[in-house]
Structures are given as C-alpha cells and as structure tokens.
Amino acid sequence: MKLNVRMQKVILELICLLYILLFVYAAVSKLLDFENFQVQLGQSPLLSAFAGPISYIVLIVEFSISIMLVIPKMRRTGLFCAFLLMLVFTAYIVIILNYSSFVPCSCGGILEKMGWTEHLIFNIAFTVLALVGYLAERRNTKTYTLVISGSFFSILLVFILYIISERVLHHQNPFVRRFDRGVVEKTAQTDLQMYNAYFAGSGNGKVFLSNTNTPLVVYEWDNRLKRLIKHIISIDHDKYPFRSVQLKVVPPYFFVFDGTVPVIFRGKVSDWKAFQIMIGNYYFSKIVVMDSLNIAFRAQDRYSKENILGKFSFSKEMNVTLINNILQKQKDGVFDTDGTMSYDPILKNLIYLYYYRNQFIVTNQHLKLAYRGNTIDTTTRAAIKVNYFKESGERKPSTPAVTINKYSASYGRYLFVNSGLRGKFEPLDLWKTSSVIDIYDLKNKTYVSSFYAYDIGEDKVSDIMVNSEGIYIIIGKTLQKYRLHKNFN
C-alpha cells in the first residue's frame, strides 16, 4: 500500500515537472519572439480578431499554472487548469484540421517544428496526463462533475471564439489580414522586356498590354503567356496635342483616348484601325469601357471643379450623363476623391476605389449607387493637405499623401485591391519584399482573404487585371498569371 502511495506521488511529481517544463519553455519561447508569436496568432482563423489580448493572456496563464504546480497546496488546482488549457489547445487544433485551410503554429520553441497531426497527438497525451494527475488524489462525484462541466465549457469557448472571430474578420475587420494557403497559385510568368507596361484589356483567350512610352503599340499574349503578337494602331486623326494616350481593349473593339484632349477613337481588333467617335468639350481624367457603346468616366465639374462620374453612350448619337453625388468630398473634392475605376462585366458593376481612404463605391451600369463598402484598413479620412492658389486657380498637395489603395481589379463577385498599408501582426521584412493583394466579396460585402505578390528585385506590383482565366499581375518587366482557388469560382 505504501509502495502504491509512493509510486502515486512519484507519478504526480513527474507529471507536474513535465508540465512546468512544457509551460515555462513554451512561454519563454513566445516571450523571446513575441512579435512573431503575435503574427502567428493574427493569422489564426480562430483568434485573428483577438490576437492582441490573447497573446498576453496565454503567457500569463502558462506562467501562472507553472507557479501553481510548484506550490504543493495549489498543485491540484494547477493540474486542473493545465487540463482545461490543454483541452482548449486540443480543440483549437481539431478545428484547424477540419475547418481551416492553414494556420501557422503559435506555440513557440521546438513545438513549432511539429506538424498539425503530431501536435494533436502531443496535446491529447498531455491532456490525459493532467487529468490523471488531477484525479490521482481525489475521486468523487463532485470531481467528475467539475471535470465534465469544465471540459464542456472549454471546448464551447473555442467554438465561440471561432464563430465570433470569423464574423469580426469578415464583417468588422480590425485590419487583420488572413493569408490562407492555396488561395492563389502562380501558373505562368514571362519577361515583358520593358517597363511602364499596363493592362489594356482581355478577351477571347487573349491578354492585351500597352506601354506609356509606345501608346499605339499593342502587345497581345495568349492566356498561357507563351505567344506574343505585336500590333500597331493607326488612327484617322493624329494631329491632336495628345499628352497621355491610353488604350482599352474589349474585344471585338478597342478604344484610344487622352482625357486632356476631348476625343475618343474606336476600332476593331481584327485590323487595329481606329476612327473618331467622339469630339466635344468633355474632358476626363479616368475612363472605363463597359461595352462597345458605353464608357464610364471621371471628370471635373465645370462649376465646382470637383471630381464627378459620368457616362458616354454611343448608340445612334452620343449621350452624356453626369452624376455629381457619387464621389464624396472630404477636403477639396479633387485629390481627396482620387482613385481607381474598374468594371465587372459579369455583374455589370462599376467599382470606384479611393486612393487615400478605406472606401469603395459600387454602382450598376447606369451609375446608380448600389452601396458603399470599406476596405479593411482603418483610414476613414484622406490624410492629405491641399494648397489652393487663387491667382492661377491651381490646387496642389502640400505634402505627399499616404496611398491606402494602389491598384484594383474586379471580376465576378470579387474585388482585388493592392493595398498600400501593412496590417496588424504582419512581418515587416515580408512587407518590405512583397505587395499585398486583398480579396473582397462584393456580393456578400465581406473581406475574404489576402495573398502576397513577391517583389522581383526592387520592382513591385505596378498593375493588376482579373478575368475568367485568372489573376494577372505586372511587376516591373515581368508579367505573372495566378489561378484563383476553385472555392472562389
């Protein structure tokens, strides 16, 4: 009998020692690399929304349990707390394995080297050890009731955190990005052998690029980025004082324009000959071709000199529609409302994304407002100061503005945004060597996920385009193609 009691104490001491080593080692490892620990928690689908406070709570709990296991009078309580904590960790991994695509381990130290299955087995073993140690001294109805109820509420807590975090992440995101594994896969890459390229459009299995230095040259790539054909555009009137000629291709048509000159040319991709279809007093600064007869544009109001949206329609004769209540002024109505425009041919939506604030606008093809959405960063007002010169009437930013959203593209129900800001818990070194593309679901009005487009040398993303074939990205002189995960189609 004495031997059994002595053996029982030895086993209990051994269990407590193992737990002290485990928790102290794990807590110290997290503490020594605390920033990385928070980064890992920030990528967890269960804990993303609570990564900040939980990073501190976990450390405090692990150190506290270790102290309790050292003190004889508190040892049993410490074992019970260790059992509940390990049960929480185990439930966490079960959800990760069954409901998440990928989450980095956030345990610290040598445990970080384990795979998820090995980690699950390890956690189950230590959970059983804590339960054995807790039940070793005393077993009665009250003890079993406490174990069962504690287990139930511990597992329930994990599921509640998962549900709340998912809701917060997608609908009320506190600027925490999710980089799910397998969201995109790079399938092709080619050397453009030139800088200053931009996407002119796509269609019929082709991708069309142009270049700001040679605006009337069209570079036609097949969708595998294997075959290149160059076309030279001819226009019927080339005596205009063009400053910045742009090209848009929407097969079977293409459009040539320069907003500083109020003319638009249209032609067919079968011969690349462009003919003038508009001339007038309508100057514009941005343009998006919706179809062969309708073009959305941004211009300045004649009276207020502020940015407004409009539409050119070319049916029997040209009609112009101006909408002056879509863009919302915060400071000057020009620089603070600057942004990118894209058109989704599937849902027939126009999307206007502000450069300097976390908002985008969705309208239908008639420029009727559908809703205003937000990107996940927290910049609600444009951080820009504008000087106004009365004599010349010019407006100029007094300081460089912080660009929140750089480039955008939309297709189907998704909006893709090249963000200019680093989110919470994102590694600084990775941010310096890559660009982030955020994905938003326009139908459900939610943030979905993000992925990195890695720099090539010192070159970063300079343009993006999306179609039914995939995501196309220009980085310096390189054109890349990515395939979106099937769950997004």
Image (tube, rainbow, N blue to C red):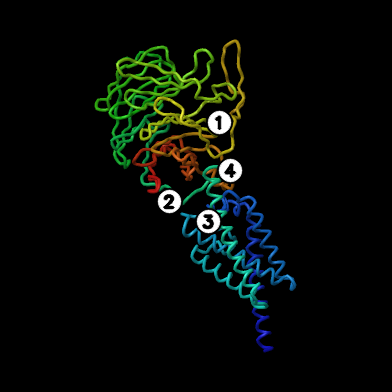
- C-alpha distance separating marks 4 and 2: 23 Å
Whether residue 12 sits left or right of residue 252 in the image: it is right
- Mark 1 / mark 3, whichever is N-terminal: 3
Above or below, comparing residue 486 to residue 467 in the picture: below
Q: Quadrant of residue 389?
A: top right
- Find the residue positioned furthest to the top: 391
Callout 2 crowding tier (Cα within 10 Å): few <14, some 14–19, many ≥20 = few
- Tell me the element at label 2: loop
- C-alpha distance separating marks 4 and 1: 18 Å
- C-alpha distance separating marks 1 and 3: 32 Å
The amino acid type of the residue labelled 1 equals: Tyr
Disc 3 and disc 4 in contact, CB within 8 angstroms? no
- Mark 2 / mark 1, whichever is N-terminal: 2
- Of circles 4 and 1, the one toward us is 4
- Picture coordinates of residue 10, whole percent (x, y): 67, 81
The amino acid type of the residue labelled 4 equals: Pro
Above or below, comparing residue 351 to residue 106 in the picture: above
- Tell me the element at label 4: loop
